[in-house]
Image: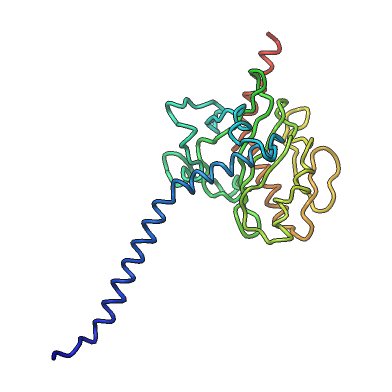
Amino acid sequence: MAAESPLKPFYSVLVLAFVCSALVAGAAVGLKPFQDANRTLDRQKHILYAAGLYEEGKSLQEMFAPIETKVIELATGDFVSPDTIDPASYNQLKATLDDDLSHQLSPDSDIARLRRLEKYSLAYLVMDQGKISQYVLPVRGKGLWSTMFAFVALDADLTTIRGISFYEHGETPGLGGEVDNPRWQSGWHEKKVYDDNGDLQISVVKGKAAGDYQIDGLSGATLTTKGVSNLMRFWFGEHGFEPFIDKMRTEKQRGTNG
C-alpha cells in the first residue's frame, strides 16, 4: 500500500480555509445591502434627534416624511440638481477619495483635520407648510482618537441651533465619548452660530460656557472638546456651509421684502 503523502493534511487545511473564506466573503456581499439600509435608517434617526423630531414608537418613515434631502455645492452654496447628483445614492465620505469630487485642504484651513474636502454636501431641509423650518447639516472632524460625525440642526433664522446629534466616533468612553450623551447635547439648544452681523462666533470652551455663542466643554477631555469646537468652526466657516447659509439668508430677505 502506497504511503500517504505528508502534504495531504496541508492540502486539506488549505481547501477548508478556501471554502470558509468563500463563505465569509459571500455572506459579507449578501449582507451589504442590509447593512447599508440599516446605516441609512440610523442616520435618519440621528437627523430627527438633531431636529427634535424623533418620537419613540412612531414610524421612522412617517417622522422623516417632512424632510427633503438635497445636495449642495459647498463653494457656491447652490443646490445641485438630482439629475446631476442623486441625493439618495451620494456618498459624501467616499467622494473625498475622488480627485474629481474633492480637493486637498491647506494646513492653515484644515482646522478640523479632514485632509480632503468634498465639493458637494448633503443637506436636510425640514419643511412645514411649504416653508423651511430647519436646516440639518452633516459635520465631522478629528477629536483625540477618531473622526467624529454629527448632524447639526439650525432654525429657520440660519444661526440658532435647534439641536445636535453625534452618531459615530471612537473617543474615550466617559470622557470624550460624552459627545453622544443626550444631557451634554441638550446644552446646544438655542445657542447661536453667528452674531447679528453674520460673523462666526460659536465655540466649545474648556469648562463652563458663558453667553449665547459658547458650549460647555467635556470634562477631562480637552482635545476632544477642541476637536468639536474646530469642526464646528470649519463647517460653518467659508470652506463649509457659510456660502450656502449666506445664499439662503439672501433669498429669505428677498422673499420677505417681496
Q: Is residue 158 above or below residue 175?
A: above
What is the count of numbered marks? 0
Q: Percent position (x, y) of residue 18?
A: 31, 67
Q: Residue furthest left?
A: 1
Task: State which quadrant residue 194 falls in.
Answer: top right
Q: How is the image coloured?
A: rainbow
Residue lying at 83% horizontally and 46% vertically, measured from the top left = 209
Lateral position of residue 157 relative to residue 30, left or right = right
Q: Percent position (x, y) of residue 224?
A: 70, 55
For the residue pair 95 and 127, the one nearer the viewer reads as: 127
Residue lying at 65% horizontally and 55% vertically, measured from the top left = 143
The quarter of the image holding the C terminus is top right
For the residue pair 144 and 16, the one nearer the viewer reads as: 16
For the residue pair 18 and 178, the one nearer the viewer reads as: 18
For the residue pair 59 and 164, the one nearer the viewer reads as: 59
Lateral position of residue 187 relative to residue 229, left or right = right
The quarter of the image holding the N terminus is bottom left
Q: Percent position (x, y) of residue 3?
A: 17, 90
Q: Is residue 217 above or below residue 232?
A: below
Q: Percent position (x, y) of residue 145?
A: 62, 60
